[in-house]
Image (spheres, coloured by chain):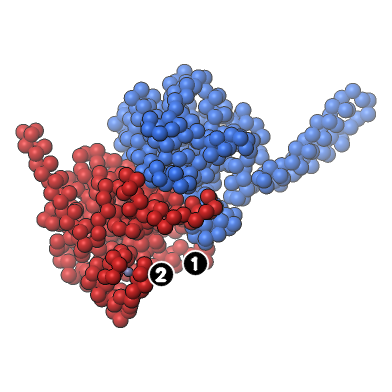
Chain colours: A blue, B red
Amino acid sequence: MNPFAEREKALLELERRIGELRAATADQPTDMSSEIAALESRYQEILRDVYGRPTAWQRVHIARHPDRPTALEYITALDRFDELHGDRYYRDDQAVVGGLGLLRGRAIMAIGQQRGRDTKENLRRNFGMVAPEGYRKVRRLALLASRFGVPIVTFIDTKGADPGISSEEHAQSEAIAQSLVAFTNARVPIVAAVVGEGGSGGALALGIADRVIMLENSTYSVASPEGCAAILWADASKAEEAAEHLKLTAQDLMRYGIIDEVVPEPLGGANRDPNAVVARVLERVDAALTALERLTPSELLTARYEKYRRMGAWGERAPAVGG
Amino acid sequence: MPMPEWLNRRRGKNDDRDAAQWSKCPNCGEMLYRRDLAANLYVCSRCGYHFRMGAYDRISTIVDGDFTEIGAEVRSSDPLLWSDRKSYPAKLAGDRERSGLSEGIVCGFGEIGGYEAALGVMDFHFRGGTMGTVVGERVTLLLEEARRRRLPCVLFTASGGARMEEGMFALMQLAKTTAAVTRFMGDGNLLFTVLTDPTTGGVSASFAFQADVVIAEPGAMIGFAGRRVIEQTIRQRLPDRFQTAEFLLEKGHIDMVVERRHIKDILARLLEYAAKGAQRLQEASR
Ligand SMILES: [Zn+2]
């Protein structure tokens, strides 16, 4: 059970009571407004207390909230979307969804990791953990975007690449490595939106972009907190500690210059007003695409190279850009 | 710098400490005299088990003579101010002391079988060969310089993946090295990788499998997800052969499995094919 969703129950209960009280007093002569005001101020207090300054670990739970908009919520909010399926070799991995569509009249290639919104969908979508077939579909669609000449928009939401036996047998490493190459080489603008969890190379396979935007409570890290704890301390239960170490919040990554923009969420997280958040993200994606539209393909490739060329935790100085 | 000089300088520390030591083969249990083991390229004389090899030892078995190192001065900071049982700077200092290395990879230029090439060798003894800023930067510098000089490049991998203590800066090295590989290869230059034990995570999911020809050493563990992670996910024990070089060869993921003593010869042959091909292209375009 998501502990954040648990704590939220008390708030939802309070919300319900305020609503009931309002409805009840509407057609009664007695003035209940002071009682309502008291409840509302208590409600705001709890809201700030629960959500005001979430820790990194709390943000991990907001990012995993079952009611947080998933990639498909963004994709279906496009003006139009035509899904394209399969890797052309073996199967259609439903942990990743992609296809052509229209965003405010602009043709785009939209690709996103899709976790499930319920148990049944989670199984079909493998919790948004993409297998090699899925990354090969992603690569194919990235190449196709260049063929069409349309920009690529990705919605990142995954704990990480699928760590199963068949994924290893089907060369997960190679699939991710080649997806990275396809994004690096794409002659069209790329905007990546981290809308949920961005976990490790499995997220980065959709994450090489000219502009990376991130929702306020999304996380993006070198490994999931559980993965990091398992790797460093052989103990996945130390995930909370790892989350605090990893500097995985949008605010941290903005400060480090690893992402370009933080998109605000309502107090309590995107799950509290999904439609508004979806609209706001699409608006920011559209703005980013408009800005990138001015660059020629070769200017785009040069700028992308130089952007990633500078990435590093430098001692005294960043080395001059070479190549 | 002539090879004996740099090699002695770099290896001095290890050799003094290891001179009197015996190593036990983890595969067959044979006790091996350290000096004999070194003479046999760190391969068990009884069962052929390939021990993990230091970067400078490896370079000395691959290049003909001189090796000119580049990027040795590159250092990272501690951007996350990481500290668990030890601080990140303390971990780095400890590994520098123990391994005699400045970081997890050594890069430079030399000749292999008479063919000039760029060469990068990762070393598992430094932070498990994990890729952080310095590994990513040195690989990138090497590829950029090789591209300028139109030379083929050979990368030996040995890595547990991205370096946790550098957080997203480490993950971004996958993007950076991919950019460098893509430019390098896009200009028609050839990249060869030799995957040694272990090659997993971010290194496996980037330049290791972006190369034109992928070679692996016998018995090397190669994969994206670590064995422990998979076993915890599926809640069963994996077969011993899973994710070995031989397993990957069978599955069609790599070009060949080559014993350590033959790797230089294979690389020299590939460089010869490359040189002959380049010459033909040059003549054909005249
Ligand atoms: Zn042995």
Q: Name the residue under label 2.
A: B94
Q: What residue type is labelled 1?
A: Lys
Ligand 1 is found in the corner quadrant, namely bottom left
**x%, y% of residue B90?**
44, 67
**x%, y% of residue B46?**
28, 70
Q: Name the residue under label 1.
A: B86
**x%, y% of residue A305?**
33, 40
The residue sitting at 59% across, 31% down in the picture is A277
Vertical order, A303 against A236 (above or below): above
**Chain letter of disc 2 in the image:** B
Label 1: state its secondary structure: loop
Vertical order, B169 against A114 (above or below): below
Q: In which quarter of the image is residue A108?
A: top left
The residue sitting at 30% across, 81% down in the picture is B20
Q: What residue type is labelled 2?
A: Gly
Determine whether label 2 and label 1 are within 8 Å by CB.
Answer: yes
